[in-house]
């Protein structure tokens, strides 16, 4: 896997979308969605700060270009997502909504999580980044999901996640389960409980284990 990653990160550093895409598709065919996302794409995205420096004037455009490349790869992996779901063989009737809270613009983690939930057998709706509380309420009213997954990358957006959860519980009378995930929970995993979450799921294995448990 190290050779795969070295090649992929080289193409990302060169903003070479075509070769990065070809490389990722080859990795996908050989290793599958989970390894591609967790061992190649996520580290490749997160490495941009280490490569160019947090204070670099280039960082913003470099990060945006890299995010765009990785989004393209993720979107083109969907047929593999469906194939892997069939291999695992779990099917849930319940819906799950996957989103980022208001002001959270980093949505690739949520997009990958949506694919992981799909592989694990859930009927998944990915709403995306920067989802206002009222928008989430309307989606919940329409889709009636049993689960809502909220992905938070920036620690400072945890307060927005809490506000969304409080509104769901107190004003919308939502009785389903709230699943949290994302880099914002890495320094203090217990914070998910303090903001009203029911579960903290950080990787595919945890999502699959959760899926099997609720499928009993």
Image (cartoon, helix red, strand yellow):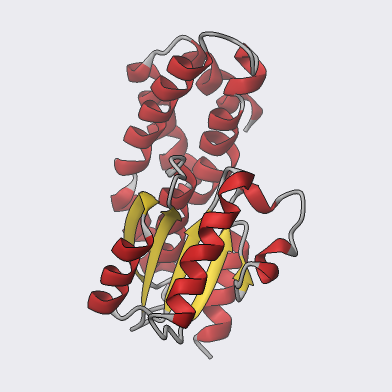
Q: Is residue 182 left or right of residue 77?
A: right
Q: Nearer the viewer, residue 4 or 170?
A: 170
Q: Nearer the viewer, residue 83 or 38?
A: 38
| Quarter location, residue 76 | top left
Asked if residue 87 is positioned above or below residue 47 in the image, the reply reads below
Q: Which residue is at 36% across, 56% downward?
A: 132
Asked if residue 173 is positioned above or below residue 36 in the image, the reply reads below
Asked if residue 130 is positioned above or below residue 59 in the image, the reply reads below
Quarter of the image where the N terminus is located: top right
Q: Which residue is at 64% across, 18% downward?
A: 54
Q: Nearer the viewer, residue 133 or 73?
A: 133
Q: Which residue is at 44% across, 70% downward?
A: 148
Q: Which residue in the rendered view is the most extreme toward the front?
A: 171
Q: Which residue in the rendered view is the most extreme toward the bottom?
A: 216
- Residue 117 % position (x, y): 44, 65
Q: Is residue 111 left or right of residue 202?
A: left
Q: Nearer the viewer, residue 124 or 204?
A: 124
Q: Which residue is at 41% across, 67% downward?
A: 87
- Residue 35 % position (x, y): 55, 45
Asked if residue 31 is positioned above or below residue 18 in the image, the reply reads below
- Residue 82 % position (x, y): 32, 60
Total marks placed: 0
- Residue 75 % position (x, y): 31, 42
């Amino acid at each position: 896997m190290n050779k795969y990653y070295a090649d992929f990160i080289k193409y990302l550093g060169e903003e070479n979308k075509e070769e990065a895409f070809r490389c990722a598709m080859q990795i996908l065919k050989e290793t599958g969605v989970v390894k591609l996302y967790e061992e190649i794409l996520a580290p490749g995205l997160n490495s941009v700060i280490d490569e160019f420096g947090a204070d670099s004037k280039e960082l913003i455009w470099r990060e945006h270009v890299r995010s765009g490349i990785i989004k393209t790869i993720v979107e083109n992996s969907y047929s593999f997502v469906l194939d892997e779901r069939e291999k695992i063989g779990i099917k849930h009737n319940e819906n799950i909504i996957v989103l980022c809270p208001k002001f959270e613009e980093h949505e690739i983690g949520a997009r990958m999580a949506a694919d992981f939930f799909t592989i694990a057998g859930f009927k998944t709706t990915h709403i995306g980044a920067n989802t206002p509380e009222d928008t989430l309420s309307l989606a919940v009213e329409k889709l009636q999901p049993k689960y809502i997954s909220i992905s938070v990358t920036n620690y400072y957006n945890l307060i927005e996640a809490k506000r969304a959860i409080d509104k769901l519980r107190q004003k919308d009378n939502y009785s389903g389960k709230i699943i949290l995930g994302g880099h914002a929970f890495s320094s203090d995993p217990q914070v998910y409980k303090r903001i009203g979450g029911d579960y903290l799921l950080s990787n595919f294995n945890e999502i699959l284990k959760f899926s099997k448990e609720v499928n009993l």
